[in-house]
Image (cartoon, rainbow, N blue to C red):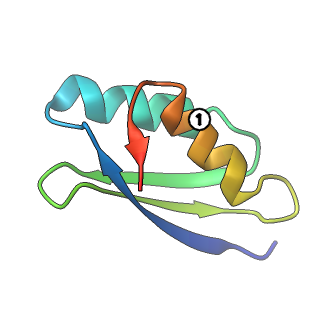
Amino acid sequence: MSQSKLVLNVNGMACSHCEHAVKTAVGALDGVANVAVDLKGKKVTTRYNPDRVNPDQIRNAIEDQGYDVV
């Protein structure tokens, strides 16, 4: 299984609830292997299988939680 890495800049995350919401939403996508949230740096790093999920789906999952992917 090949894995890709995606690092997104995300505005609006400020607390552990934000971190949990993003990790839960992105982690629920089929093909996502790992999600790391850096609140201070406003970044979300994801490792995923590009044959099962694409960057747009990951972005949409974050935006559906109310955060802005820039």
Quadrant of the rendering where the N terminus is positioned:
bottom right
Q: Position of residue 47 (x, y in %)?
A: 57, 64
In this rendering, is residue 18 above or below 59? Answer: above
In this rendering, is residue 34 above or below 19? Answer: below
Q: Please identify the quarter of the rendering in which residue 57 is found.
A: top right
Q: Residue furthest right?
A: 51
In this rendering, is residue 65 above or below 31? Answer: above
Image side of residue 54 versus residue 13, left or right: right
Tally of numbered discs? 1
Q: Position of residue 23 (x, y in %)?
A: 43, 37
Q: Residue at x 29, y 35 (%)?
A: 19
Between 44 and 66, the one nearer to me in the picture: 66
Quadrant of the rendering where the C terminus is positioned:
bottom left
Judging by the rendered image, the residue that carries numbered circle 1 is 61
Image side of residue 32 versus residue 23, left or right: right
Image side of residue 15 versus residue 10, left or right: left
Query: Dot 1, how many residues are within 10 Å of its Cα: few (below 14), some (14-19), or many (20+)?
Result: many
Q: Please identify the quarter of the rendering in which residue 22 is found.
A: top left
Q: Position of residue 10 (x, y in %)?
A: 34, 50
The disc labelled 1 sits on which kind of residue? Ala
Q: Please identify the quarter of the rendering in which residue 9 is found.
A: bottom left
In this rendering, is residue 17 above or below 29? Answer: above
Q: Residue at x 33, y 29 (%)?
A: 20
Q: Residue at x 66, y 74 (%)?
A: 4
Mark 1, secondary structure of its residue: helix
Q: Residue at x 18, y 30 (%)?
A: 16
